Amino acid sequence: LGTVVGGIATAPLAGWIGAENLLVLWAAAVAASFVAARAGLRAGGAAGLAHSTAHRRGPSMWARVADGARSVRASPLLRWMSVSLAVFSVLYFTLSLLFARAATAKFPNADRLAGFLGLFMAVGSATALIVSLFVSNRLYARFGVSTMILALPVVYAAGFAGLAVSMAFGVVLVFRFAQMVWVNGVWAGAWQAQYNVVPPERRDRTRAFIDGVALQAGVATAGILLILAQTVLPTRALAFIGLAAAVLGTAAAWQARRVYVRALVDALREGNPEVFVAEEEPFGGIRRDAAALAAVRAGAASPDPAVRRVAMEVLAASQGPDARAELIRGLGDEDASIRAAALRGLARWPGTDEVVAPAARLAGDPEPDVRRAAVAVLAVDGRASAGAAALRRALEDPDAGVRGAAAGALLADGDGVDAAATLEGMRASADPVERVAAFDVLIGRGGIEPVAAALGDPDPGVRAAAVSSLPAPPPAGAAPALARALGDHDPDVRAGVVEALVRTGDDARGAVEEAVTDPDREAAAMAVLSRMDGTSPDRIRSYAEREIVESVRYGDLLRRLPADADADARLAPLAHALRDRAVVHGVDALAVAGGSWEAGAVRAAVENLSSSDPGQRANALETLDAVGEPSLVRPLIRSWEALAPGGSDAEPPLAEALGDHDRWVRACAVVAASSRPGMGRAIGALARDDPDTLVRDTAAATAAGGEAMETLASLSLMERVVFLLRVPLFAKLAPADLQRVAEIAAERVHADGETIAEQGEPGDEMFVVVGGEIRVVVYGDGESTVEVARRGEGEPVGEMAVVSRAPRMASLVAAGDVRLLAIDRRRFERILRDRPDVALAVMDVLCSRLRESSGARQAEMVG
């Protein structure tokens, strides 16, 4: 558009200010584009700026060039693309010189020349735009993108052949116009599409090498050639040189076209669907590439199931006339994932007997994924009626997803008695998977009641699934139930509810304003209001400033604790709680105030604040400084740069923490102060008067110089929280998350020699050793036993059987009196799903177990 408008305006501007003054206007436009580009980079690329220090420490420029060269050298397609681009640049600049000479001869007056060139560029650009919109996709679909690239040197060859015969201005003009339209309207899109065969992680550096090395080599060659043309070569000689270069370019493009087909097959084999389906929209921009679709059709018949699977997924995403026949053939494939993909693709077409009949048959397939896809096919465009018998049978399916989908299809078709009963039974089931499937259907049918019921479910997975299944916008009247869920303990549920309320708009404002008055929901409610039109910026800023003050206060309180607080069993919970509060209040402030900042950069920075790598934390702080408002961000940065204890006297910060408004800080302060005689009065006051049950119970257990916690006959909730904080599996959890783990952990006591778990039995529980030791014993043939390990205080045991769902590989026997916390498999799996930190810690434990086992075997072999 800029080229068209500028080109049309060139003639009158040249007549008004003179052609030579157009250079001043051009320079001003370059300066303006520089300012705009720099502003864009600052706004959108701040995350990259935050890692500039790391980049400076990275490989040198020459090392990166060498890396790109290796990538290109390893691919026949990229090698021929590099050669082609170098030749194309020679052809481009050779034609540019000939056109400039012809135009200058035709229009010796500078003002008229400028006007002609501007008009020519405007018409050429407008024509290229029309071609790219209405012609190029049809050419790609008919001939393929590689053929359209090959057509460019053919255009050059025809044009230079014409110039070799006649150098008339009309011949040069037509040649230049055809080249310009083809390059901008057809070739450029096809050329970029070929990069899709390169894996995403290598695509940028590959493109940079080809454009920065191969293209520039062609530019340098063209420069030398044009210098010769200005000095020693006649004009017609350039036409013959251009013709020879066009022949060379045609050969290189032909070779690239040949290996492109091979690269497409390799992409199918490697499971790289980006070559065939765009990320944002299937075939968005380039609707179809004939060569790519030919490779997909061939892949659908490949003997390799992995290739067939990718081909079927691509066909399912496309809507071409050839895809339907391939998908119907895929219904009989021996691989279940291919049958499911074929069914998902066929759900896009109106129901016919050739689709409904096999879908009804596959509704009884042995694989649940296939049955779910078959039910989805039968539920579309009247197929529920044609396949009603199969859908009714599916109401008895053992898979909850199949039953739920079948019930939803029958309800939509008016056959709802059995379907409604099925959904009601699933909704009341003790299995969260059943409830998820039921709520998915019920919420999809509309109404407020299923939304409220799902958001009140005890399982966070059910609540999160319910939020994700809400339509956009959510049902009318759902805002109060959603606003109540802003205080949900699960961060994924809260995040989903925030998004749902933002989509609801002003209809949710009243419920959200009410939620702001609840301390447990205030942060999430303010995150909603900050993204709603009509919310006062002063209100948003005031909240952010208040949260920053709280974050800085907790950081200061943490730094006043003794330097060894993290290693002290009593002070460590308080240090953990203060660190958590400092970060949480700061993140709440950023979430509200950062609406106009770079969201991705803020999110990445916050995630890296908890990294164990000091360099990553430094990068995170630098990112926040780059993208945020300095007056808000810099107090946080100064506080977060050293979130570690560093004081000497514990009593002043403990006294302040005992009176804090946060329940967790007070409870942890009670634990820290329990061994300090001078604080008995303050602890006693909390035991009598604190409004929170957890704080009162914790204070009551230690008031008046009570027994040390470790000697009590049974662990209280707070004691369990304190203990779990010392267990590596749970050490990184927030205090509220530790409480939930402590609540589901059952305490067990075993006497010396007692068997805790038997080798070969199902692994239904994992254990954490609170006190004593556990012998890990393997029983061999007969009565022989081998002790393979011992687990002591703070160590998890039995987690491998729980994670793998396999029988236990060893027995667990008490070595002396043992106290344990036991977590059953279902609840432990929920922790793993909901808390990635725990899942990563489990991976660390499993790795250490493998290293331990490997070391024992090596020692045995050496012995």
Image: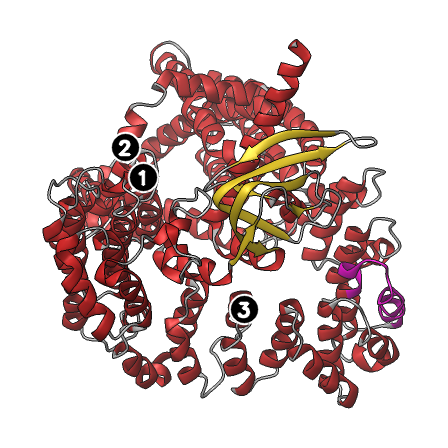
Dot 1 falls on a residue whose secondary structure is helix
* Residue with the mark numbered 2: 52
Dominant secondary structure of the residues highlighted in magenta in the image: helix
Please tell me whether mark 1 or mark 3 is closer to you in this view. Answer: 3
Where residue 642 sits, quadrant-wise, is top left
Q: Please provide the residue range marked out in magenta.
A: 353-371
Circles 2, 1 touching at the beta carbon (< 8 Å): yes
* Residue with the mark numbered 3: 459
The residue sitting at 54% across, 26% down in the picture is 160
Q: Is residue 699 left or right of residue 320?
A: left
* Residue with the mark numbered 1: 48
Please tell me whether mark 2 or mark 3 is closer to you in this view. Answer: 3
Label 1 is placed on what type of residue?
Answer: Gly
Where residue 524 sits, quadrant-wise, is bottom left
Residue 858: % across, % down: 64, 16
Residue 239: % across, % down: 50, 21
Compared to residue 739, the image places residue 832 above or below, namely: above
Q: Is residue 822 left or right of residue 408?
A: left
